[in-house]
Image (cartoon, rainbow, N blue to C red):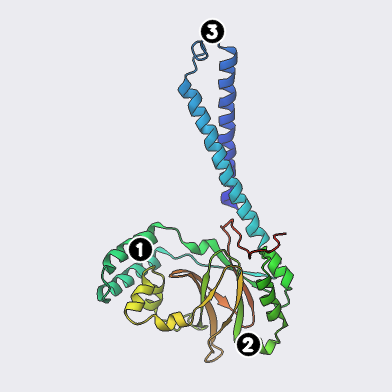
Amino acid sequence: LSRREVWLGDFDAELRAVLARGRELRERLLFEDVDRAGWFSAAGVSPLEVTRLLERHLDMHQRGARLSRQLQMLSRALRQQGAVSSRRRAFQARTMGEKLQTSLVCLAAVAVAPVPGSSEMWLATTTAMWLGGDEAWQHVVYEHPRDAETETILNQFQCHSWKAREALATWSAMPPSKRRGCVLVHNASVRRVMIKPNLVSCIDGQGEVNDWSAALDHHPLGSVMKSAMMMGGEDNADKVVIGAQRLAVVQLPPKPDTNWSWRGTFSYGDRKVGECALREGGVFSFICVDCGLRVGDRGENPA
């Protein structure tokens, strides 16, 4: 919100300058031109000056349209905040040290994996990872209260899918005993998402997966390297694929004792988005706050 205020302030100042320049140029053309035969001759206004002013007006219109779309997405994100009881879980963006660790671990895997052209693929994907933006800040997960109604959850994300409504109603009608060991995940984004539940120790915060394997998961080439080294079969078996505007029941792995908790890893195919804590029997919604699109079923009522 603070960045939006700065952008609006800069845009307003530049717009005022362009309008003032336009008024000045209009006065020079209308009142200083004593020679009717030549429009620009006596006023001292060159065609290039008028062209540049028109280009600045066009640029301001384009920037205004972009700001309008950003404000609409921001308004949509604020509406999706829901009630005060809804818990918002933001993903943590990767630090420079984590990116460096991921790059080095993947490079070591490339050196030992028998994949032709893996070195070139590593260079291209690593460059794209360092130069590209992190998707973690664009996505959040909302944990809904246990007593939340079906209409409240669906209206919060403007979801009119009858399949999603039916799945959520079926979950709400289930007795608490059948919800043990599982969670309901609602994919409120516009893309297919994968979720993989895993155990995390409450004592040291470490999971069942070792550090180098977790670092390999953060790299775009990590899944290919794991498949080449015969390490990706078990990981893919635990992943649950959820389509856009769909809900799925995700089974949680059994806990050895009370010193363990659950975390869910969300990803778009081979690209990891982030992790968040999961609670048994809860309802979670995965959304993209920086997307202005909406996906729905054919024939649904958009109202």
Mark 1 in CB contact with mark 2 (< 8 angstroms): no
**How far across and down, in percent of the image, does residue 202 sit?**
52, 83
**How far across and down, in percent of the image, does residue 80 sit?**
66, 62
**How far across and down, in percent of the image, does residue 4 sit?**
58, 49
The single residue placed furthest to the front in the displayed view is: 299
For the residue marked with disc 3, what is the amino acid? Answer: Asp
Does label 2 or label 3 sit earlier along the sequence?
Answer: 3
**Residue identified by numbered label 2:** 180
Mark 3 in CB contact with mark 1 (< 8 angstroms): no
Report, in whole angstroms, how far the alpha carbon at label 2 lies from the one at label 3: 88 Å
Does label 1 or label 2 sit earlier along the sequence?
Answer: 1
Q: Quadrant of residue 95?
A: bottom left
Between 95 and 136, which is closer to the camera in this rendering? 136
Vertical position of residue 75 compared to residue 238: above or below: above
**Residue identified by numbered label 1:** 125
Q: Judge whether residue 16 can be spotted in this image.
A: yes
**How far across and down, in percent of the image, does residue 278 sit?**
58, 78
For the residue marked with disc 2, what is the amino acid? Answer: Arg
**Residue identified by numbered label 3:** 35
The secondary structure type at the circle numbered 3 is loop
Q: Judge whether residue 207 can be spotted in this image.
A: no
Q: Residue at x 37, y 72 (%)?
A: 222
The secondary structure type at the circle numbered 1 is helix
In the rendered structure, find residue 273 and report the number of the disc placed on it.
none
Q: Residue at x 52, y 33 (%)?
A: 56
